[in-house]
Amino acid sequence: MVKKLLLYIIASVLGIFLAIWLAPNVQFNGSNEIIVITGVILGLVNFFIKPILKLVSFPLQIITLGFFNFVINIFLVWLIIDVLSPIEINGLFSLLITTFIIWILNFLIIPKNKQ
């Protein structure tokens, strides 16, 4: 469980670094420590709060064939990055790109449950 939490944090920190580097209209002029702190907060939120949001929104996920899961990801990235940190994301397209980068890294880094 702790290993999975650390993987969420690592994926979030790397995703934010990549989004600042690759995504258009994502600006940051501070120190790298702020990016790491933001990534840690995003990783913690993805680990603890996202499963609750997915459970509550289960009927919407069924109706939208899982697309609403991406909407939850967009909301969490917006909440953490745009509201709580000095990173600026200007525009919905930049937010979508940032969310997609973080989602891809979460998909690649975090192992899925084998049952």
Image (cartoon, rainbow, N blue to C red):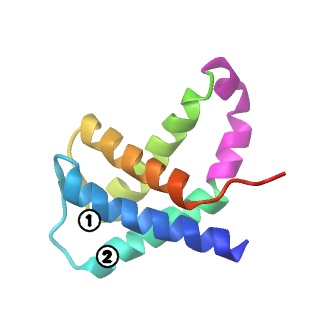
Q: Quadrant of residue 94?
A: top left
Measured as percent of width and height from the top left, residue 98 is found at 33, 48
SS at badge 1: loop
Measured as percent of width and height from the top left, residue 20 is found at 23, 59
**Label 2 packing within 10 angstroms: few (<14), some (14-19), many (20+):** some
Furthest-right residue in this view: 115
Q: Quadrant of residue 65?
A: top right
In the drawing, what numbered circle is on residue 34?
2
Query: What number of labels is visible?
Result: 2
**Left or right of residue 95, residue 37 in this image:** right
Which residue position is annotated with label 1?
86
**Left or right of residue 51, residue 69 in this image:** left
User: Does residue 32 lie above or below 108 as drawn?
Assistant: below
Which stretch is magenta?
A: 50-64
**Label 1 packing within 10 angstroms: few (<14), some (14-19), many (20+):** some
**Left or right of residue 33, residue 112 in this image:** right
Residue drawn at 22 percent across, 79 percent down: 31
Q: Nearer the viewer, residue 111 or 99?
A: 111
Residue drawn at 37 percent across, 49 percent down: 101
Magenta-colored segment: predominant secondary structure: helix
Three-letter amino acid code of the residue under disc 2: Ile
Mark 1 or 2, which is nearer the eye?
Answer: 2
Q: Nearer the viewer, residue 112 or 29?
A: 112
Measured as percent of width and height from the top left, residue 113 is found at 75, 54
Residue drawn at 32 percent across, 81 percent down: 33
Q: Nearer the viewer, residue 20 or 52?
A: 20
User: Does residue 42 lie above or below 94 as drawn?
Assistant: below
**Left or right of residue 18, residue 7 in this image:** right
Q: CA distance from mark 1 to mark 2?
A: 8 Å
- CB under 8 Å between discs 1 and 2: yes
Residue drawn at 53 percent across, 61 percent down: 109
